[in-house]
Image (spheres, rainbow, N blue to C red):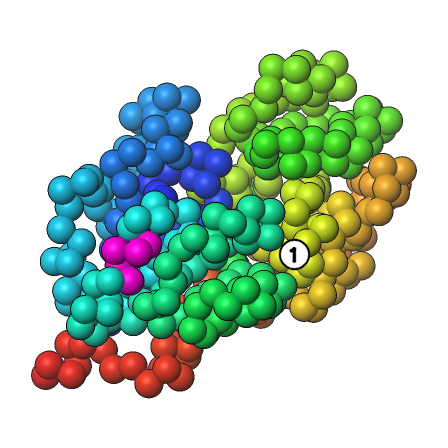
């Protein structure tokens, strides 16, 4: 089958987590003999910021790291009708121009035979619901929501014909343990600042415990204001700025543990959605301690795959114990890795996607033509 993915960017993961998952899904589809192409706008905010931050070398690095992935950059004159004419499945990510969302719906309504899918991997359905309410999803065959609470939001609002839960997952071709790298740090957190959606939580679940324990810690991510960078420095936390997602497994391998600090909307309004960082960390076999979120869908085995910390003091205690107990650290690493490999890789998600497509009774166009 031919899959066309409308994404904000495949090339850039600068403050753009959907690129992580999409790369893994496309890789798996291609390995199975399908055709997959991503379309991204010429004015992509993420790609512009990546170039401004890292230069064009970061773009070249993407192509070296993912040689089998195809991405086309489109402008206002691009012929979307021609590009999707022979597609079997077209997936529109929610971070796209509303006019484009509507245009693809009209193309589908006017006789195109592809399956048209809307894919939501963000919290704006609950935090800025009016933005999604204005999207025209009436001609979309399917909505993929990355958590059951988000699916229920779509259903209650009447958005979309059919809504299915489709969680993110780790690309375990990329995210895996790298045991040959020496562990020179105690703690590494990979995460972006995020519009003050977790600034207090970063202080409570990262900065405070690091300061209290006096451990060797580092942060990688973008959009940190100058005052936050200065606070990290004063607290003994090294700030390293942007890191390519493909380099994260080697960075994790150099640290003895990591933490997860979810953004506030996921904790308050979208229970059960951990975001992709948890899947990726556990796939690397690094012990993880998480700030609070509710695993309402039973994705993991809290206390076995990772530890929950419900306060700054509990986070510090968990970190101290993991650093002082090699057996506990090894058990967490093995258990988290086992769960991801058994349930939460991009292979599993592609299995699910193909099953969903088959359940809708769709036949690939080129098989029909034959």
Residue 3: percent from left, percent from top: 27, 64
Task: Write the start and end of the magenta stretch as one range.
Answer: 101-105
Question: Please, is residue 116 above or below residue 71 in the view?
Answer: below
User: Residue sitting at 33 percent across and 22 percent down?
Assistant: 55
The total of numbered circles placed on residues is: 1
**The magenta stretch spans residue 103:** yes
| Badge 1 density bin: few <14, some 14–19, many ≥20, Cα 10 Å | many
Q: Is residue 51 left or right of residue 183?
A: left
For disc 1, the marked residue is 270
Quadrant holding the C terminus: bottom left
Q: Nearer the viewer, residue 2 or 33?
A: 2
Q: Does the magenta stretch mainly form a helix, a strand or a loop?
A: helix
Residue 269 position by quadrant: bottom right
Q: Is residue 311 left or right of residue 105?
A: right
Residue 90: percent from left, percent from top: 29, 63
**The magenta stretch spans residue 159:** no
User: Residue sitting at 69 percent across and 43 percent down?
Assistant: 264
Quadrant holding the N terminus: bottom left
Q: Nearer the viewer, residue 81 or 309?
A: 81
Question: Please, is residue 353 above or below residue 120 in the view?
Answer: below
User: Residue sitting at 22 percent across and 42 percent down?
Assistant: 73
Q: Is residue 226 left or right of residue 201?
A: left
Observer able to see residue 198: yes
Q: Tag 1's secondary structure?
A: loop
Q: Nearer the viewer, residue 106 or 163?
A: 106
């Amino acid at each position: 089958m031919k899959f066309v993915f409308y994404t904000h960017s495949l090339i850039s993961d600068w403050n753009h987590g959907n690129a992580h998952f999409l790369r893994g899904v496309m890789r798996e589809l291609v390995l199975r003999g399908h055709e997959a192409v991503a379309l991204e706008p010429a004015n992509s905010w993420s790609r512009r910021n990546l170039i401004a931050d890292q230069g064009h070398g970061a773009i070249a690095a993407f192509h070296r790291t993912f040689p089998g992935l195809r991405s086309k950059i489109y402008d206002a004159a691009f012929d979307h009708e021609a590009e999707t004419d022979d597609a079997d499945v077209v997936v529109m990510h929610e971070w796209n121009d509303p006019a484009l969302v509507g245009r693809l719906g009209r193309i589908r309504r006017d006789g195109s035979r592809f399956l048209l899918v809307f894919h939501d991997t963000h919290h704006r359905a609950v935090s800025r619901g009016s933005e999604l309410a204005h999207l025209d999803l009436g001609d979309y065959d399917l909505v993929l929501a990355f958590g059951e609470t988000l699916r229920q939001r779509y259903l209650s609002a009447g958005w979309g014909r059919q809504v299915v839960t489709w969680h993110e997952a780790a690309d375990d071709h990329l995210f895996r343990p790298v045991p040959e790298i020496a562990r020179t740090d105690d703690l590494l957190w990979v995460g972006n600042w995020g519009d003050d959606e977790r600034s207090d939580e970063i202080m409570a679940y990262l900065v405070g415990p690091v300061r209290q324990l006096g451990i060797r810690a580092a942060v990688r991510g973008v959009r940190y204001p100058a005052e936050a960078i200065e606070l990290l420095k004063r607290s003994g936390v090294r700030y390293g700025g942007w890191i390519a997602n493909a380099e994260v497994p080697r960075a994790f391998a150099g640290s003895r543990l990591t933490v997860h600090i979810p953004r506030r909307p996921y904790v308050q309004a979208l229970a059960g959605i951990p975001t992709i960082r948890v899947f990726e960390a556990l796939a690397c076999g690094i012990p993880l301690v998480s700030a609070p979120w509710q695993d309402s869908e039973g994705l993991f085995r809290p206390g076995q795959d990772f530890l929950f910390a419900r306060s700054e003091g509990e986070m510090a205690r968990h970190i101290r114990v993991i650093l002082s107990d090699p057996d506990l650290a090894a058990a967490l690493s093995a258990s988290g890795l086992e769960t991801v490999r058994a349930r939460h890789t991009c292979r599993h998600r592609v299995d699910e996607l193909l099953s969903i497509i088959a359940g809708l009774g769709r036949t690939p166009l080129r098989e029909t033509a034959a």
